[in-house]
Image (cartoon, coloured by chain):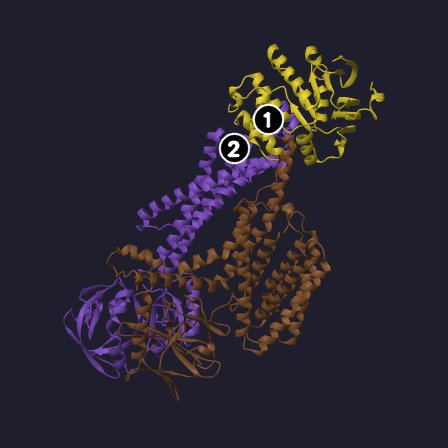
Chain colours: A brown, B purple, C yellow
Amino acid sequence: MISALKLMPVLLAWSGIAAALVRHVSGRRSVLAISCASGFIGGVAGGNLLLTLSKGEIVSSTVKSLTGTCFLCLWVVALAAFYRVTGSGGQGAPGEREKPYAFTVSCSALLAGLLAGAICVCRLAPQGGAPLLSLFVLGTAGVLLAVAAIGIEQYVPADITVTGEALLALVVSLLLFASSFTLQLDLFSPLSMKVMKFVHDFVHQFFESMLVPDHLFFRSDAWEYIGYLFGSGVGFWGGLLIWFAPVVLICAAIRLERLPTVSHIRQGAQRRKLLAAFIRERNCRLIVPCFAMLIMAAAVYNSLFPSVEYWDPKPVAVTMNDSGEIVIPKKGEIDLEDGKLHKYLLKQGGREARFMILSAPDGRLTVTLDACAICKPEGYGQAEGAVICYYCKTLIPLETMGRPGGCNPVPVPFKVGADGVSLDAMTILDRWSETVTTTSRIKGGGK
Amino acid sequence: MQRWCWLMHIVLKSLVYRQGRSLLLLGVLAMAASLVTSLGIVSSAMGLRVAEEVRKYGANLVVLPAAARLEVGSGGLDFGTVAEPAYLSQEELLRVVDREGIRDCSLHLRGHLSAGGQELPAEGVDFTTIRRLYPWWQLRGGWPDADEAVIGIDLAARLKLKAGDRIRAVGTAGAGEYRVAGVVSTGGEEDKLLFIPLARMQETLGVGSSVSQARLLAQTGGVTLEQRAAWLQERLPGSVVREVRQVARTSEGLLRKVQLLMALVTSVVLIATASSVASTMSMTVLERGKEIGLLKAMGATRLGVLLLFCGESIVLGLMGGGAGYLLGSGIARFVMQTVFAVSAGIDLRFAGLSFAVSLGLALLGSAGPMMSVFRLDPVRSLRGE
Amino acid sequence: MNDKSEGRGKVTDIIETRGLTRSYGEICALKPLDLLVPEGEWLSVMGHSGSGKSTLLNLLGGLDRPSGGSLWLGGEDLMALSQDGLARFRREFVGIIFQQHHLVPYLTALENVMMAQYFHSVPDEAEACSALERVGLGKRLKNRPGELSGGEQQRVCIARAIINSPRLLLGDEPTGNLDHANTRMIMELLKDLREEERFTIMLVTHNREVAAWGDRIICLDDGVLVREERTGR
């Protein structure tokens, strides 16, 4: 089944979480198995319940905020670990590590299971309730995989140890990886968007408050470099930095830890042997955080190149008739009311404009430009239940199409007649040039 | 980490000690990598370039109505059509062509008009597209403006017309008078035709907005011409899409043959390089037999000694890859400049290929010697056997 | 042939062989040999070339595998070790010095010693420096083997052999290529080191004077132990 294929990576991530938890506690398998299983089932049931009650928005935002909170926790822990190792003569030698309480670990197992279950359900059916059978199958699959992972974990070489921070890093990275498969739950794109907007606003305000007039003090190529700050590149690289920083800090904290003293041993060879053993043990502790880094990179890759195919038809050329109107028939070759996006290209006297017609789920037709008022006009595509702006990767729910504002495409007035939709060509062309000229200036210039 | 630093240190010292040998291997690897890089860059650029050159030869696809019979005749003898003329719908054609993104499409409408009591074959065309798609048209006189005509050289001789004269052509549904703007000579069938604007031809023949054939220039990036033709045919029911075989096929075929040749040359060079690396490395291993035996006597595991030698191969491979990429890019740039008169940009994709080739050759070539290192008996080598 | 009375219970035997043989095809280099060496002893093995003394050394150093018999060193059964096990044994338990001073030609004296450290665990420059100073080469650390004299090279080999604190030091005619003065110097050095570190030494030599430095001398002829004597040191 296709859904089984879709869920495979998410379930594998979940089993990885279970295995990591067990390795950290090194024992108490049954307790952990129970908490993992119950967490997962709770997540699946709760997620599905919420999905059927609300429309899907609430669930995705809840899951997203929970995962985001976990990520922030990871940030805090990473900074603390790094400070502990580098600042004010930190020691934190491995021998002094406390034994992790089984209670805290099982609580975290429960939480992780809840989140993982919710993510699985969202992946299975982002819109609403999935059939009971598939939920049941999902629940059992999750439980079985967790138990299997806990069982298989004892065959993983015992050298690979998992410290507390590394465990958190791995669990969070696996959760982020799992959620990167679903468009609505993905965290990297919103992060890079926020970074881009932040930088944009910051530089904007900076130039405004400095009262720098255009072009007066800077040469034009300096503006080009400044223009980079406004592009999406800064969002991407800034987001990447924020994304990887915690795991890198944890790796650095482990690497920079001071090795236990061996100077009390007289014989040189013994000393060196002990030292070599310590180094090897430290390197083994680095394996898990490095693996977590790979997982984070995979999550970024999923976010950038989602396996979702965007429905983006080639714009059909239309011309205006003698009265300056464009008439597009509702039925015929293209059925306007099939819930899919239809794009059109209008060329008139050297000017051109792209617009699209979409039938929203509540039945009304919306006609909008293929550009929004904020971003560069790279166009839109349609994915499950939403329209996505290619430039900033924002998802616009189908219900809000036709309303202006934000990253929504600019609406265009139209009349629905018996034969089809009629639009005024000049309005479209004018509105297009307006939108495009404002948004194109984002790349260069300070205003 | 200190162990890795030490290993690197030893590897580099070892390479520097045998400078001559290392430089030789480096040179060989760099040469192979540069060959692969330069041929790869030139080959990929050539593909684009040839496509551009093909454009100069005009249309590569022709769309005919399915019901049209072949023009009966051979070579210069034209016996005319044998059945009722069939037409294609102009709007349909333009729509499909536009959707496919084909920009150059010239429409033709053939028919017979009478002028001065004589029957003459005429064709309605759009002169702007003709200018683009038919660069070999030699026009004596000038290109026509609106409502002007062009006459073929043979026809001009028959009717005793030249540029600037006026001609009156009568069709089944109308008539028109045109000024002859120029006389065309191509050596083909155009020499016998009268060319008038398409719209006027359609009026004169009274066929509405139909055409008798369309010639297209389709880009073949990514899909072969045959696939393009098949797609178009699907979308234009009632029509037949054929390739204009003259140049398109041959240039594509030629390009493919040249690329195959370059690939063969490259593989031969790679094999030679691998064997050269292998022989150099095995000689090195023979020479260093005592050293290897000593290391094993000191207590090094077999893998430990192997790591040392692999490290040397890897370092040489990486350096060879880098040098090969730079050299190859330079060579490719030179070749493109002189042969194609095109300046090539920096292509980083081939950096990866260059490194892969160099590393692969280094490791492959040293695979055999590595095995003998692995199996070396320290006692015999220390004794000097 | 062997003194079993001294073996059990009183002094731990660092080397214990029973019926140890080594044959190369049809040629038997070492006939069945029983040998017991208590810890801390300086044993000299004498014999002409071809008498099997080098073979015995190679077997005891873990460089070669016996064809038959049993071989126990430091309580470990060498016959049961794999190739990698033998490698570990070589680097932790044994130090070997050869007649031709085998040093890595492109590394300095210091780096040669650190090489042994690297294969053992981690390289430690300070320790290697002090080891070389102990053998009297404090000023010649950064010299390549090509720039050192025969005696100096052998001293580097000694430093390298004992850097990992082995319990057994094997020498295959270490002074064979050296002149009289250097020979004396090397033997004095070995004696001093042995007193400090308390390892067992087994030297193979054909030189009577060199052999007399040891506590016990055994003579091999054609793979058979023919004579054994104590020197009274």
Residue at the far front in the pictured view: A88
As drawn, the label of residue C202 is none
Residue A289 position (above or below residue C145): below
Query: Chain letter of disc 1?
Result: B
Please provide percent x and percent y for residue A384: 51, 73
Left or right: B79 in relation to B315: left
Please provide percent x and percent y for residue A87: 52, 47
Q: Quadrant of residue A6?
A: bottom right
- For the residue pair A202 and A59, the one nearer the viewer reads as A202
Q: Residue at x 83, y 21 (%)?
A: C6
Q: 10 Å neighbourhood of mark 2: few (<14), some, or many (≥20)? A: some
Q: Residue at x 68, y 13 (%)?
A: C210
Amino acid type at mark 1: Lys
Amino acid type at mark 2: Thr
As drawn, the label of residue B290 is 1
Determine if residue C226 is in view: yes
Depth-wise, is mark 1 or mark 2 nearer the camera? 1
